[in-house]
Image (tube, rainbow, N blue to C red):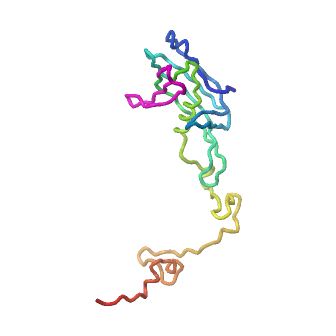
């Protein structure tokens, strides 16, 4: 497995030769906000990258990345494997004064990857691309029952002692809530029913 995804751009910068890199990753370690983060995958994630010269200090990166991201189920927090097939395509600019590669918005509105080391580490770029392409939330199963809000028990494994059944009466759309029902008692304005206001 590749420790970190790198592509060597020295020849491209000197003679405009295209550059290529590929490999498999178990995880991505990258810097963000001054802290080190790790993005782990359920199985080796294959990546393939080609970089072509555009003239001057600009170039274009294209390729693919196929990670299987591990996310938490939105209801019960179980691990959920999320296979992804990400198509890569990003403008690049070489700036020797840049210590750490970063993404910015180009004049055209496209993302621009600015870098200063010809031995380019793609970890942060691939991590950010993966996180942006990932779904906001996932379920381990469509009928996931979630966790008990009292004790945290996983209700997919069976009920817990806090699962008290609360009767719910049928409500007639035309007649409204029947008098004397549980719902009527829970009406916050029920206490005002007998209130007598002074006459003007």
| Residue 95, image x, y percentages | 48, 21
The structure residue drawn at horizontal position 41% and vertical position 28%, both measured from the top left corner, is 106
The structure residue drawn at horizontal position 48% and vertical position 81%, both measured from the top left corner, is 178
| Residue 93, image x, y percentages | 47, 22
The structure residue drawn at horizontal position 55% and vertical position 12%, both measured from the top left corner, is 11
The image quadrant of residue 145 is bottom right
Image quarter (top left, top right, bottom left or bottom right) of the N terminus: top right
- The answer to whether 59 is drawn above or below residue 137 in the figure is above
Name the one closer to the observer, 181 or 19: 19
Name the one closer to the observer, 51 or 11: 11
- The answer to whether 162 is drawn above or below residue 41 in the figure is below
Query: Is 104 a magenta residue?
Result: yes
The structure residue drawn at horizontal position 45% and vertical position 17%, both measured from the top left corner, is 57
- Magenta range: 93-114
Image quarter (top left, top right, bottom left or bottom right) of the C terminus: bottom left
The image quadrant of residue 58 is top left
């Amino acid at each position: 497995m590749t420790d970190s995804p790198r592509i060597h751009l020295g020849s491209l910068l000197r003679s405009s030769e295209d550059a290529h890199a590929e490999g498999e990753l178990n995880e991505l370690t990258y810097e963000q906000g001054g802290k080190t983060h790790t993005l782990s995958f359920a199985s080796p994630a294959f990546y393939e990258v080609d970089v072509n010269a555009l003239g001057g200090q600009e170039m274009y990166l294209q390729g693919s990345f196929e990670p299987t991201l591990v996310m938490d189920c939105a209801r019960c927090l179980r691990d959920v494997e999320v296979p992804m097939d990400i198509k890569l395509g990003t403008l690049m600019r070489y700036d020797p004064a840049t210590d750490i590669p970063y993404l910015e918005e180009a004049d055209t509105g496209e993302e621009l990857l600015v870098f200063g080391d010809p031995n380019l580490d793609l970890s942060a770029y691939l991590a950010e691309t993966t996180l942006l392409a990932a779904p906001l939330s996932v379920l381990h199963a469509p009928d996931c029952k979630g966790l008990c809000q009292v004790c945290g028990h996983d209700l997919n494994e069976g009920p817990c002692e806090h699962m008290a059944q609360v009767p719910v009466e049928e409500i007639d759309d035309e007649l409204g809530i029947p008098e004397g029902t549980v719902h009527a008692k829970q009406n916050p304005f029920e206490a005002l029913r007998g209130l007598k206001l002074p006459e003007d």
